[in-house]
């Protein structure tokens, strides 16, 4: 953590769709003398000024010109701030220089990354540097993977209270979701597939549930790659397109916290599609929709849903913790906006503010839940429209 800087947070990519929402959220909720000092950064000062005026941010909100292809501009941005909140993805195309510079300078960094191979490359390259400089590098602060990482964290805390110990098996199940994935998520999936096609060694990394836990390989995990009937929940389930990043982050979180879930922990994520033949047919439809995500017809970066669509979006996630003797705990995590934009923009903003208020978090490459734990759960409930509830 860097000593005091001109700004507490710079929103990098503030002219993009999600970056604009983050800046709008900060402008609406964090102004005044006691609020964090924040600035907007992007390639064009004219576009930044237009966004600042469009979102109703104060006229004196600072604007910084910075471009992923210009390392000097990135350094100039980093030198002015304690933390960079980056919405400029796919990160494997536009993020590597920025992470390297933040790690070297002791500047905190947060993003919305859902690209596990790139994240592993960054861990291997910069973990030691970040530990020595004090930079807290925090990936995956949006719908990938915060509600899932914290859902498991909350489920395990509940198991400890109710069953007396954490459980070695948790199921993550998407019960409801209204709203689209972001264009950035679609672009990241395409970039990941393209990189794997060029370098086949990445395929094994993509398939490895423990790709983000260097030096640790846990037990075999459920593949989650085809529709299955879940007898415990009496419902059909379909593959969840974000499981390949979320499950990896959950295992990394377990590692970073010193294995509170145990070294034999098993976790998977699926979409609940209902009982009977209808549930089975729905599961097959989800598989078809997943295949379109990385195709040419998906959302483009910079595009997104209307304000009404964001405001009427939601998600409802179920986490079932199962003890070896069959006893269970069930918890729900819900969000009050569409997952890819409305909820994500609030979550990453609150992560940045929460990290600033957690000087005890040491330098290194973190998951948000492992870094901030219960304090982050409380912050998201108080400010970002999430709920965490124990179910009977």
Image: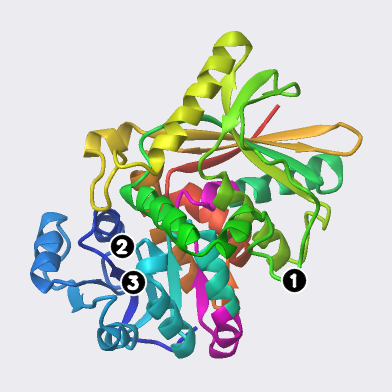
Label 1, label 3: how far apart the Cα atoms are:
43 Å
Residue bearing the label numbered 1 = 215
Callout 2: SS: loop
Residue 95 rendering spot, x and y as whole percentages: 39, 71
Q: Nearer the viewer, mark 1 or mark 3?
A: 1
**Which residue lies under the disc numbered 3?**
34
At x 75%, y 35%, the residue is: 329
Q: Which residues are magenta?
A: 125-148
Q: Secondary structure at mark 3?
A: loop
Q: Nearer the viewer, mark 3 or mark 2?
A: 2
Which residue position holds label 2? 30
Image quarter in which the C terminus is found: top right
Give the mark, 2 or 1, whose residue is nearer the N terminus. 2
How much space separates mark 2 and mark 1, taking CA atoms? 41 Å
Q: Is residue 237 magenta?
A: no
Q: What residue do we see at 50% from left, 83% from top?
A: 1
- Residue at 40% across / 40% down in the picture? 293
Query: Secondary structure under badge 1?
Result: loop
Residue 207, given in percent of the width and then of the height, sits at 63, 53
For the view shown, which residue lies furthest in the top direction?
277
Residue 392 shows in this picture: yes
């Amino acid at each position: 953590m860097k000593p005091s800087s001109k700004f507490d947070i710079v929103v990098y990519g503030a002219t993009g769709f999600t970056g604009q929402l983050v800046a709008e959220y900060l402008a609406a909720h964090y102004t005044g003398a006691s609020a964090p000092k924040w600035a907007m950064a992007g390639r064009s000062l004219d576009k930044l000024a237009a966004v600042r005026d469009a979102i109703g941010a104060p006229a004196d909100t600072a604007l910084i010109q910075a471009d992923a292809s210009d390392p000097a501009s990135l350094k100039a941005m980093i030198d002015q701030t304690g933390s960079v909140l980056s919405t400029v993805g796919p990160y494997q195309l536009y993020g590597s220089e920025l992470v390297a510079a933040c790690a070297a300078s002791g500047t905190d960094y947060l993003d919305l990354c859902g690209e596990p191979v790139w994240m592993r490359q960054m861990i291997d390259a910069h973990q030691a540097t970040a530990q020595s400089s004090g930079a807290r590098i925090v990936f995956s602060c949006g719908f990938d993977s915060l509600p899932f990482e914290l859902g498991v964290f909350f489920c395990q805390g509940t198991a400890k209270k109710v069953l007396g110990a954490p459980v070695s098996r948790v199921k993550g199940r998407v019960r409801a979701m209204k709203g689209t994935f972001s264009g950035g998520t679609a672009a990241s999936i395409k970039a990941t597939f393209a990189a794997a096609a060029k370098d086949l060694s990445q395929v094994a990394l993509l398939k490895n549930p423990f790709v983000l836990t260097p030096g640790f390989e846990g037990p075999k995990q459920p593949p989650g790659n085809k529709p299955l009937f879940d007898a415990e929940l009496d419902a059909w389930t379909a593959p969840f397109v974000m499981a390949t990043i979320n499950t990896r982050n959950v295992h990394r979180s377990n590692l970073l916290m010193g294995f509170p879930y145990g070294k034999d922990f098993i976790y998977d994520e699926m979409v609940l599609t209902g009982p009977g033949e209808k549930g089975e047919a729905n599961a097959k439809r989800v598989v078809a929709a997943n295949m379109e995500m990385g195709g040419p017809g998906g959302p483009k970066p910079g595009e997104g849903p209307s304000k009404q669509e964001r405001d009427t979006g939601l998600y409802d996630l179920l986490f079932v913790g199962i003890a070896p003797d069959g006893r269970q705990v069930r918890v729900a995590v819900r969000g009050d906006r569409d997952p890819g934009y409305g909820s994500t923009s609030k979550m990453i903003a609150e992560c940045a503010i929460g990290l600033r208020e957690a000087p005890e978090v040491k330098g290194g490459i973190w998951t948000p839940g492992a870094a901030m734990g219960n304090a982050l759960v409380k912050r998201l409930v108080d400010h970002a429209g999430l709920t965490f509830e124990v179910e009977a």
